[in-house]
Each structure stands twice: as structure tokens, then as C-alpha cells.
Amino acid sequence: MTLWTDLFILALVLTNFKLLATSRLAALIKTTAYQAVALSVIPLTLAARPWPLHLALLSLVTLAVKGGILPWLLRRAMREAEVQREIEPIVGFSASVLIGMVLLGMSFLIAVPLKLSVPMQSAFLFPGALFTTLTGLMIIVSRRKALTQVVGYLVMENGVYAFGAALAVQEPLLVEMGILLDVFVAVFVMGITIYQISREFDHIDTDRLSELKG
Amino acid sequence: MTGRISLIYWLSALVLAPLLPGVINRTKAFFAGRKGQPLLQLYHDLFKLLNKGAVTSRTASWVFGAGPVIGLAAVLVALALVPAGGIGSLLAFPCDFVFLVYLLGLARFATVSAALDTGSAFEGMGACREVQFSLLAEIALLLGFAVLAAGTGQLSLSDMFARLWSRAQASTNSTALLVAGSFLIVLLAENSRIPVDDPNTHLELTMIHEVMVLDHGGVDLAFIAYGAAVKLWLFTSLLVGLALPLHTGRPLIDLAGIVAGVFAAGVFLGTIESTMARLRLIRVPQMLLVAMALSLAALFWVLR
């Protein structure tokens, strides 16, 4: 079982690097969908078979929301805002990958001294989840386009979710479902906001929005 | 017994190495709908070049002539260091992977010095690119070897590859695949294959390796072409040893398997070259950074 968990966490880590290295928004969105697939499988690999019903349900809903609906919403926002790629990020793509490597190392370093109150089944789960969260944060602070920042937010939440996945066996289903609903609503609202911004100002560059002080 | 098998492998690699570029070319020709050059084309080329004299520029010194010789010698020794899957290498000692990387570095240094020695502006440019890209590729390569060493707990390449897939340990096997991905990118960069360099264009501005050897001719060029083929074989066999678990216990079957694997990898490389466009030069370091990231992620994985 841990072999599969490790493999899917590895997939999570690799998608993070892909997210840091790519400039095309369509590829970014597609990668978040792949990440969602890995994410939805991780809780299942941790649980003993036969899988409890609530866990299978959680996994399915995660796949549907994060792998289906959210990418669809983001792609629609992309089409309506008429942006194809992140052109001038604040931190370049090569530098982002380098920083990503440092973040990955840091996540592993932090995981060692932390004594978690709940024992983790896989030694990689905590570093992988932390790295995903940090990657999301990195994308939010280093990119200019509002849409990319929404993707960053989504990735950050994916990290939190991966961390929660370890506890999902004990944790009530309602909490995870609540988080999922929150994210859905947030991305939904952000998608509408991006559309409004791009219609009003002809761009979705967040840097230039700060010039709008009254 | 194992020593004799290793010797047989080394010799067969030396004989079969020029066939590998032929296989790649035929695959590319197949994708393009052409008939393609004969499989044995490189053998004919080598034979032709060995019978030719060479003209040397008046500005060139002895460094120019020494480049191909040192380059070929270093690559031949490097091949003796590389194990083929479960078969041990001809030369094996603790930490030989560092020696291997340095030998490849020495071959590169010789080629680059010979290129700079001609005083040609084009060759200087090619040398500059070669060094720039290998700077990143070397880190990925060394980190990858470090992963294997840490994962298997062995220090010589032969022991590493022998233990790699035999132990049913999850962390080692999944990281071996990561390292294989990293080595694939390094292979493409080090052997100037398509996403990095296109050997077919004969336009100096776009090439890396071919530019550096523009002034070489005759026997020197034969040495360079043969050295490149052996280097390609070396990297391909490393990749095959990583990605394919070939441990039947019978050395001769392992040997046949690894040779077949290398040619299968040649077809795979040809497919990559046919389906991908050459990257812009400024994107190449980014690709090598990804190779570094893969190796480093694997290293963290192993060390925890």
C-alpha cells in the first residue's frame, strides 16, 4: 500500500515542478487536473481494503470537483479573458524551478523535527503536502496574471487537502466536504471576477490594478 | 566468469556502437516516410574517413590534433566503467561514478579546447554552448548517481545496478524511474539529440556539437564520429539498466537482453526526435533544470 501512496505523492511533486516551469495557462490548468487525480487517489491508498463508503465518496467528489468542474471553470475564464500565457512573471520560470528545488528540500528538512500528533502512514505525505502548499504560495507571489494566481490558490489548497487526506480515515466526512465546497465557491467567484476585470480594463494584470487608488 | 562476460560486453559495445545512430536514423526516416540511409552507414563513413588525409589550419597547434585522440580514449575508458544492467563493468571500484563523470568531462574539455584552438568564431560559439549546457547536465548526472548510491547503499556502479531492482524496496524502485527520466534528458543534451540540437541542419547557428568539429577531417573526424557513437551507447545503456530490470541470473541472456534493450531505446530516441521540435536555445537550460529537479527530488526521496 505504501508503494502506491509514495508513487502518487511523487506524481504530486512532479506536477508541482511542471506548474512552476510552464508559462501556458492551458497547460497550467491541465496540470492542476492531473494533480487532482493524484490527490483523489491518495486517501484510498492509505485506507485498508475494502474501502469505507465515505472515503470512496470523498474521493469521487474530489475527482469531480477538482479534476472536472474547477478546470472547466478556469478554462472558461481563460477563454473569456482572452489570455493564453503568463508573459512576464515577477520571478522567471527557470528561477521558479530552482526555488522549487529549495522549497522541496526545505519541506523534507522541516518534516524531520516535527513530531505529529497523528502518526503518518507514509513518510513522504507530510513533505509532499507541504511542498504543494509552498508551490501554490510561490505561484501566487511570483506571477502577475490574476488567472495564474487563482491556479496558485488552487494548488495551495491541494496541499492542504493532501495533508488532510492522511487524517481523512479518522476525520468526519463533513469537514472535507465543507472545504471542497469552499474552494468550489471561491474559484467560481474568482472566475466571475476575472471576467469582470478583463471586461472593464482589457487585461487581468494584478500589478496594474494597484494603480487604481481613488 | 563475470569478468569474461564484462569483456565480451565491452567489445560488443565497441563493435555495435556505430549501429545505434543508424537505428535512430532509420526510425526518423520511417516517421518521415522516407527509406532512409542504410543501417551500416556510419561504418562506411568511418571506413571512408580512416582512409583519408586531413588538412590542418595554420593557426592550429598540437591541441587541435590531441583533441579527438584524448576525447576518444576518455570515452572508451568511460564505457569500460559502465555496467550493463546486472552485468558488472570491466573496471569497478568504489566511487567509480565520479571517475566516469570526470572522464566525460575530460573528453568534453579536449573537444572544446580543440575547437577553440582553430580560432574560428563559429567553433568558439559551439564550444561556449556545449560548456554551458553540460554545466547543468553534469549536476543532474552526478545527483542521479548519488541517488542510486544512497538508495542501494553501494558505492561502485556495478554493485548499484546489480542491487537496483533485485531488492523489492518501494523507495529505490520509484526513484530509479525518476533518475531514468533525468538521465533521458541528460542523454538528449549530452549527445546533441533533437530537442537540444539538430545534427542534420548543417546550419552553424543552430548547432552545438557539429559546430565544434567543423575543421576536423580524415582520421580525426572518424575518431570524433566513433567517439560520439560510443558515448551515445554509454548513455543509452545507463538508461536501459535503470529503466529495465534485467536480472535473469544467466549472464549471456542478460547480455543479449541489454543489447536488445539498447537498440529498443534507439527506436524510442528516434521516436522522440521525430515527434518533437528542436527547442529554442534559451529553453534548453530550462529543460536541464528540470532534469536537475528530477534528480534532486529523487535524492530527497531517498535520503528523507
Image (cartoon, coloured by chain):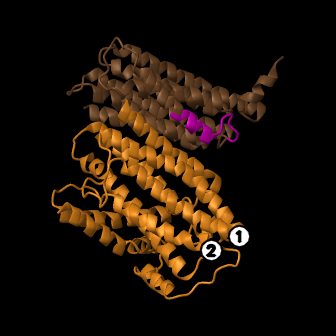
Chain colours: A brown, B orange
Residue A37 makes an appearance in the image: no
Whether residue B117 is situated above or below residue B300 in the rendered picture? below
In the displayed orientation, state which residue is furthest to the front: B62
Residue at the image position 53 percent from the left and 71 percent from the top: B68
User: In the rendered structure, the residue with mark 1 lies on which chain?
Assistant: B
Give residue B120's mark: 1
Whether residue B292 is situated above or below residue B194 in the rendered picture? above
Q: Quadrant of residue B129?
A: bottom right
B294 or A129, which lies in front?
B294
Give residue B53's position: percent from left, percent from top. 56, 87
Residue at the image position 59 percent from the left and 59 percent from the top: B130
Q: Is B154 on the left or on the right of B205, as rendered? A: left
B63 or A114, which lies in front?
B63
Q: Is A171 on the left or on the right of B26, as rendered? A: left
- Kindly report the distance in space between the C-alpha atoms of the residues bearing marks 2 and 1: 9 Å
Give residue B276's position: percent from left, percent from top. 52, 60
**Span shown in magenta:** A87-101
Q: How crowded is mark 2: few (under 14 residues within 10 Å), some or many (20 or more)?
A: some
Residue at the image position 53 percent from the left and 77 percent from the top: B220
Classify mark 1: helix, strand or loop.
loop
Looking at the rendered structure, the kind of residue marked 2 is: Leu
Give residue B177's mark: none
Classify mark 2: helix, strand or loop.
loop
Tell me whether the residue at label 2 lies in contact with that at label 1, contact meaning CB atoms closer than 8 angstroms: yes
Give residue A67's position: percent from left, percent from top. 45, 34
As for residue A138 lying within the magenta part, the answer is no
